Amino acid sequence: MDNTSFDYIIVGAGSAGCVLANRLSENGKYSVCLLEAGPKDNTPFIKIPAGFAYFMFSKKYNWGFDAKVDSTIRNGQPLFVPRGKTLGGSSAINAMLYIRGQREDYDQWADLGNTSWSFDELLP
């Protein structure tokens, strides 16, 4: 394979980028370059739920963004928005937590004609 050209270039090796790269390359028809700005995900803290405390202050694995300031909340102070900078992206530094999506969002998808996409149908 010629390493200087690719069929697809994916910027960001977070959850979505990794899945997309896998799907595009699984049949061997396409070459994919997956780029990640952060270091390898070989720190043991990624595998320890309590390790998230380390990542909140790590400039190596966390972009450390602040949300746009809104003068009506937090007395105008920015809200810290940790974002992962490693293979797995923010999912690698989130203490193995997830938040289920809002019921209304799923139900709206179903109402728009996406059969079997309602909250109750996807919950199992």
Image: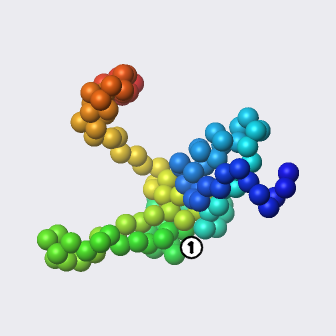
Residue at the right extreme of this rendering = 1
47 or 63: nearer the viewer: 63
- The residue pinned by badge 1 equals 60
Residue 27 in the image, given as x and y percentages of width and height: 73, 35
Relative side of 32 to 71, left or right = right
The quadrant holding residue 53 is bottom left
Q: Considering only vertical position in the picture, is 118 above or below 58?
A: above
The answer to whether residue 44 is seen in the rendering is no
Residue depicted at 42% across the width and 66% down the height:
82
Relative side of 63 to 111, left or right = right
77 or 57: nearer the viewer: 77
Residue 116 in the image, given as x and y percentages of width and height: 37, 22
Residue depicted at 56% across the width and 73% down the height:
60
The quadrant holding residue 40 is bottom right
Q: Considering only vertical position in the picture, is 40 above or below 123?
A: below
Three-letter code, disc 1:
Lys
**Element on which disc 1 rests:** loop
82 or 97: nearer the viewer: 82
Residue depicted at 14% across the width and 71% down the height:
72
Residue depicted at 64% across the width and 39% down the height:
23
The answer to whether residue 78 is seen in the rendering is yes
